[in-house]
Image (cartoon, rainbow, N blue to C red):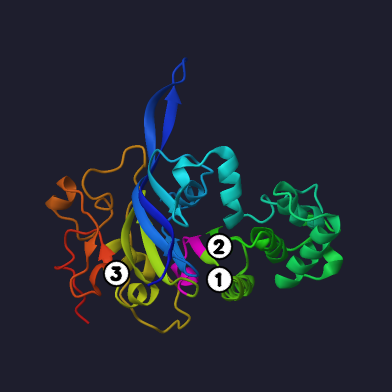
Amino acid sequence: MTDKLLEVENLKMYFPVLGGVLRRRVAQVFAVDGVSFTIAAGQTLGLVGESGCGKTTVGRCVLRLYEPTAGRLRFQGGNLMQLRRDELRTARRDMQMIFQDPFESLNSRHTVQEVLEEPFVIHRLGDAAERARRVRRLLERVGLPRNTLLRFPHEFSGGQRQRIGIARAIALEPRLIVCDEPVSALDVSIQSQVINLLLELQREMGLAYLFIAHDLAVVKHISDHIAVMYLGRIVEYTDADTLYRSPRHPYTRALIAAIPVPDPGARRHVEVLTGDVPSPMNPPSGCHFRTRCPHAVERCRTEDPRLRPVPGGPGSHHVAACHRLEELMPTD
């Protein structure tokens, strides 16, 4: 049985909306509303959905960059929610993050050497000579030459800057890395290089990834399992092959249908989403997706669907939150 490295249970993150002269709370944003998943050691969970669905907030809550409103976070068997500040700093040696924007996430006044030395300085690891040796090794691992050590972030291309960000993330040899849309700001040709680098590092170091993205075509090549989010909730979860072969939730189907096909003559049925994403301050009653779903019925308006096993699917490994799973069985 594969070890459970990270366990997230019923995670909630509500942000207060302040108003009035006294800046009192007048509403709240339901950014994450009851998310649960696990990540096994050495595996990748892809977390996908449209912008604003709460993916990044989940990642930041896992690292406790945000303090969750409710829920349980367990990492390597320990309760992350109970850690004090000093204990949390120690735990973060095993949990790191790769940010979406490689330029904004790097200190523009620091050289590459200073950027990559910082994790060792913060955690008081090694002397100056040891840190310099480790920094050179990090550059080699991410495919950058040693003569870049004294250059600044603005002197690199976007793909090179993201390699520096990856080097910083693996500096302390963590077990889990939260990848927050690490390739969305890069050209398509560079995206594949960065994905291949992440896969190579995963094989070498036994890393586990929480890979956050809005592009299902990207997560297909790196994920073992995929969770699809909509408006703060997971609406479908299964292994990557099953999700692409047999998506069951209408939202997942629409996302997969939106993936470009390289053959201009290919014909396929496309489920086009209509309307705008509802506000997370005032989500729809019942099923959050019903206002955009072509299959919605009255029950969807009044009753909140829960994740349940897909009929005919591989047991609890394929779950979806839809009242009409049986009726919407694929006919092909």
Q: Secondary structure at mark 3?
A: helix
Q: Where residue 88 sits: x, y (%)?
A: 56, 44
Q: Amino acid at mark 2?
A: Arg
Taking the image as drawn, is residue 97 in sight? no
Residue farthest top in this picture: 21
Q: Is residue 211 shown in magenta?
A: yes
Q: Which label was assigned to residue 206?
A: 1
Where is mark 3, residue-wise? 317
- Asked whether the beta carbons under mark 2 and mark 1 sit within 8 Å of each other, the answer is yes
Q: Amino acid at mark 1?
A: Gly
Q: Which residues are magenta?
A: 209-220
The numbered mark, 3 or 2, whose residue comes first in the sequence reads 2
Q: How far separated are the C-alphas under marks 3 and 1?
A: 23 Å
Q: Secondary structure at mark 1?
A: loop
Q: Where residue 257 sits: x, y (%)?
A: 36, 70
Residue at 80 percent of width and 58 percent of height: 131
Q: Which label was assigned to residue 175?
A: 2
Instruction: Quadrant for residue 220, please give it.
Output: bottom left
| Residue 83 shown left or right of residue 32 in the figure | right
| Residue 102 shown left or right of residue 274 in the figure | right
The numbered mark, 3 or 1, whose residue comes first in the sequence reads 1
Residue at 58 percent of width and 64 percent of height: 183
